Amino acid sequence: MADRPYTLLSCGMSLDGYLDSADVPRLALSNDSDFDRVDAVRAASDAILVGAATVRADNPRLLVRSAARRTERAARGLPESPVKVTVTRRGDLDADAAFFCTGTGEKLVYCPTAVAPALRARLGSVATVVDAGWQVDMRDVSKDLSGRGIGRLMVEGGGTVHTQFLTADIADELQLVVAPLFVGDSRSRRFVGDGRFPWHADRRATLAEVRQIGDVALLRYALSARFCAGSD
Ligand SMILES: NC(=O)c1ccc[n+]([C@@H]2O[C@H](COP(=O)([O-])OP(=O)(O)OC[C@H]3O[C@@H](n4cnc5c(N)ncnc54)[C@H](OP(=O)(O)O)[C@@H]3O)[C@@H](O)[C@H]2O)c1
């Protein structure tokens, strides 16, 4: 078994590369058909990871929406929705967040040793708090998830988290949806921040697929030799 899960990064961004808008809460970048496609990707995953800022800003449920997909997972002996995973440095997470309150599956929170006891006291009844050492490293998170039986990980953002998976070269696939709008406000979050990325002018990523989904474009990039073209 590989020492980390097959890791798929999923993201919607504006034409100018933003994930959100500083002014508009929960900016809708995608459309219904694409939300349904993302739901299928979720249903095919063992775990979904988001950063703590996304838990706070979007209050996402991160559940499989389609009843048919939930039934199909159950028939395969899987929980109806994937395991939910988040990471936090400060430990500022609310037990009432939809991340913790919805779905019956496991919820994992990776945090540094310094905040683990307080976080356990606050979230202990709704999540498993994993002490990740003096700082949380996405390689270690990936390895730990693999040890917990996670074979396929979907990373749903935000940009801080995507940046770390990309710069650490531990992503196998990127599914980037480009929405036909501009945000035009540098206070908003970009798809990625600064960093040394393994793909640059001398080592270009492989564009594996371009698909039009209504008014958005899905770009699929193969980021490793493990890329699995059939998975969408
Ligand atoms: N368009 C899309 O597809 C999409 C998807 C998801 C999110 N979003 C948007 O993206 C925005 C959030 O993005 P973001 O980049 O600000 O944040 P993010 O990646 O969601 O979360 C960042 C937070 O995660 C925690 N974190 C990240 N790396 C860590 C590490 N190595 N160790 C410990 N904790 C770590 C920290 O939490 P603490 O602050 O708790 O320490 C950090 O502040 C939201 O506005 C959301 O709406 C858009």
Image (tube, helix red, strand yellow):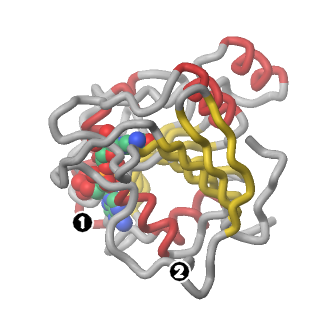
Say which residue appears at 67% left-offset and 12% top-offset: 67
Q: Quadrant of residue 13?
A: top left
- Does 10 sit above or below residue 133? above
Q: Which residue is mark 2?
A: 200
Q: Are marks 1 and 2 in contact (CB under 8 Å)?
A: no
- Does 62 sit above or below residue 188? above
Can you give x and y, in whole percent of width and height, for residue 34 in the image? 58, 29
Q: Which residue is mark 1?
A: 114
Q: Nearer the viewer, mark 1 or mark 2?
A: 2
Q: Dividing the image into 4 quarters, which one contains the C terminus?
A: top right
Q: Secondary structure at mark 1?
A: helix
Which of these two is toward me, 158 or 150?
Answer: 158
Q: Upstream in the sequence, badge 1 or badge 2?
A: 1
- Does 196 sit above or below residue 13? below
Can you give x and y, in whole percent of width and height, for residue 31 in the image? 50, 24
Q: Secondary structure at mark 2?
A: loop
Can you give x and y, in whole percent of width and height, for residue 187 in the image? 16, 51
Q: How many marks?
A: 2
Q: Quadrant of residue 25?
A: top left
Query: Would you say residue 11 is visible in this rendering?
Result: yes
Q: Amino acid at mark 1?
A: Ala
User: Mark 1 vs ligand 1: CB under 8 Å?
Assistant: no
Q: Which residue, as the protein is rendered here, is positioned at the far bottom?
A: 202
Q: Dividing the image into 4 quarters, which one contains the N terminus?
A: bottom right
Can you give x and y, in whole percent of width and height, for residue 16 in the image? 35, 51
Crowd tier of the residue under label 1, counting other residues whose Cα lies within 10 Å: few below 14, some 14–19, many 20 or above: some
Kindly report the distance in space between the C-alpha atoms of the residues bearing marks 1 and 2. Answer: 36 Å
Q: Amino acid at mark 2?
A: His
Say which residue appears at 50% left-offset and 66% top-offset: 165
Which of these two is toward me, 34 or 162?
Answer: 34
